[in-house]
Amino acid sequence: MLAIGARMHYRLAGMPMDTTMLVGMVLIPLGLALSIYGLMPRLAQMRATLQNPHAHLTFHLADREPLNRAHWTLVIVLIIALAIDVMKPATLGFVIPGMTVEYDISKQTAAKLAFWALLGTTVGPIL
């Protein structure tokens, strides 16, 4: 997309949806589905748990506890945090070239803005 954006002076608004972009958009949820599948217990284990009300559906967890609501909440929060964390550098790769043209600033200034944004993202939660 960045290579295509060069022809548009890195203004990605109005970029045509080509085959590469569509394939990439399909691969994202496919990768997510495969990741979720990898986390799930096997079907035989799930059937055995459903047939026996006293059995627990266990994953290979460090705490050796049956999977409960707190585990699911933690997994969901971590998935969201990982998705946001991965999007930041990818988004900056698209934003910086366009920002230099659109706001008439130097690449160094745009890089400093990106640096301070990422620094705030990493240091802010710790503080």
Image: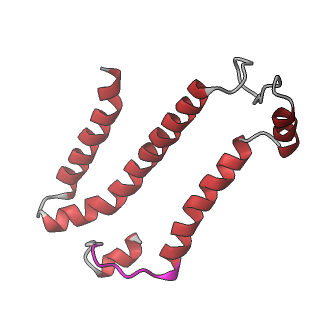
Based on the picture, tell me whether residue 20 belongs to the magenta stretch: no
Range drawn in magenta: 13-19
Q: Residue furthest left?
A: 104
Q: Residue at x 77, y 30 (%)?
A: 57
Q: Residue at x 42, y 45 (%)?
A: 84
Residue 62 image position (x, y, % from top left): 70, 20
Of residues 125 and 49, the one nearer the viewer is 49
Quadrant the N terminus occupies: bottom left
Q: Residue at x 54, y 30 (%)?
A: 74
Of residues 46 and 115, the one nearer the viewer is 46
Of residues 69 and 107, the one nearer the viewer is 69
Q: Is residue 66 above or below residue 6?
A: above
Residue 21 image position (x, y, % from top left): 48, 74
Residue 10 image position (x, y, % from top left): 28, 72
Predominant SS of the magenta segment:
loop
Q: Residue at x 72, y 23 (%)?
A: 66
For residue 56, which quarter of the picture? top right
